[in-house]
Amino acid sequence: MASYTYRAIDDHSNILSGRLQAKDESELEKKLGGQGLTLIEFTKTSLLEFGKSAPLKFHAQELLDFTYMLYLIISSGLPIMGGLNDLMQNQERKKMARAAELLHEKIESGLSLSEAMWENPQVFPDYFVHMIRAGEASGTLDKSLQYLMGYVEWQINFRKSVRSALVYPSMVLGTMALLITVIFTFVFPKLINILTGLNAELPLPTRIVIAVIGFFNKYFLMVAAGALAGIILLKIWGRSYDGRRVIDRFILALPVIGDLSRKINLSRYLKTLATLYASGLSVDRTFSIASGVVQNAVISDALSLVTDSVMTGEGIAHAMSKTGIFPAIVVDMIAIGEKTSSLDNTLQRASDIFDKEVPETIKKVFGYIEPLTIVMLGGLVLLVLLSIFLPIYKIAGSIRGR
C-alpha cells in the first residue's frame, strides 16, 4: 500500500487536492472515481515523509484537538469525507493529518466512523469509540463529540492539578536524595581518610559509616546490578494478574497514599460513567467501559462486580455500597439520582467531590512527608556530627591527658 498525493476535478469543474493510500495508480483512480472525481495528476510519496515508520499515538491534548476538529466538521454540516480530506492537508500538524487519513481510508472502504476508529485502538481509546457509536446510532454525533471534548479536557486538567500538587514534595525529596548522595560520595570518604590516618580507636558511629562506605565502594556494581534486576523483575511480575493485584492491594493499604489512590481512581470512574451515561450508551457498555479505565486492579475488580450486579437488575447505589470503596455521601447521592432520574448530573457532582478532595489529600500526604523529611535530615546531620566530631573529640582528649 502506497501513499499518493493527487489533484482531481469534480463534476462542477472544481479542482481538489488530497492524499490517499492505494495499491497502485489504477486503484487510486478507481477510488477517486467512486467519489465522483476524475484524476488529473498524482505523486507517489514516501511513507517515511509522513512519519508512518512509527505507529501513530495521540497524547491527551492531541486527542482533544482532533475531537474538536471533528466536532466542527459534524456541527457545521460538512460531509465527513470532505472534512477529513481537508484535515489531511494540514502539514503543520502531521499527527492530525495522518489520523484523518487513517479514518478517511477506512470510511472510504465502507466502514462507519466508529468502526474506522475501532480499527485504530492506539489512537482512539475504547470509551471514545463507544461514545461515537452511540452518537451515530442516536443521530446525535455532535453531542457525543461535545461530551468527549469535555471528558478529555477534564482528564488533562485533572492530571495537571495532580502534577502541580506533587511538584514541591518532589523537589524536597529530590534535594534530600542529592544531599545524601553528595555527603556519602564526596564528603565522608575524605574525612574518614583523615580520621583513619590518625591511628586512633574510632567510635561506633564512625566505624558504621566506614563499613557502609567500604561496602558500597567494594560492591557498588553488584548492588546497582541487583537493584536494577530487582526493579525489572518487579515490573515483569507487576504485569502479571496476581502480581498486579498484590502491588495494588499494598498501595491501597498504605496510610494516606492508599486513600489518595482510591480517590483518583474513583474520580476517573465516576467521570467516565457520567460522560458515557449522558451520551446514551447502553448500561452494560457504560459500566464495563468505566471499570476498565480504572488503573488500580483491586478497585477495578470491585467495580466489575458493580457492573455484574447492575446487569442483574440491582440498583446502582446498592451495588456500589456493597463494594465498601465508595463514601456514604456518594452512595446516597447516586440513590437520589436513581429515584429522580437525574443520574447523569448526580454522577458528575459525585466526581466533582473527588476532584476537590484529591489536591487536599496530596497536601495531606506532604503534611506527613515534610516532618518525616526533617527527621531524616536531622538524623543525617546527627550521624555526620557523631562520626566526625566524636573521634576528633576523643583524640583531642587523649592529647590533653598526655
Image (cartoon, rainbow, N blue to C red):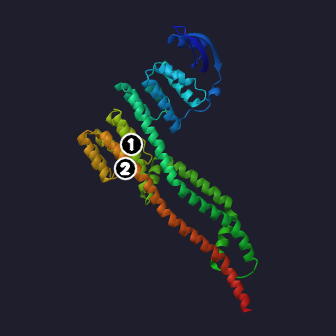
For marks 1 and 2, the one nearer the N-term is 1
Q: Is residue 35 left or right of residue 210?
A: left
Residue 261 sits above or below residue 33 on the image: below
User: Residue 256: x and y, percent?
Assistant: 43, 59
Mark 1 vs mark 2: in front: 2
Q: Residues within 10 Å of mark 2 (few under 14, many from 20)?
A: some
Residue 363 sits above or below residue 266 on the image: below
Whole-number angstrom distance, CA of label 1 to CA of label 2: 11 Å
What count of labels does the image hold? 2
Which residue is at the front of the view, 178 or 323? Answer: 178
Residue of label 2: 353
Residue 192 sits above or below residue 356 on the image: below
Dot 1 lies on which element? helix
> Residue sitting at 49 percent across and 35 percent down?
64
> Residue sitting at 69 percent across and 70 percent down?
188
Residue 298 seen in render:
no
Query: Which amino acid does the dot numbered 2 rest on?
Result: Ile
Q: Is residue 26 left or right of residue 128?
A: right
Residue of label 1: 271
Residue 323 seen in render:
yes
Q: Residue furthest left?
A: 339
Image quarter in which the C terminus is found: bottom right
Q: Are marks 1 and 2 in contact (CB under 8 Å)?
A: no
User: Residue 152: x and y, percent?
Assistant: 45, 38
Q: Is residue 111 left or right of residue 323?
A: right
User: Residue 340: x and y, percent?
Assistant: 24, 41
Dot 2 lies on which element? helix
Query: Which amino acid does the dot numbered 1 rest on?
Result: Lys
Which residue is at the front of the view, 395 or 358? Answer: 358
Residue 19 sits in quarter? top right
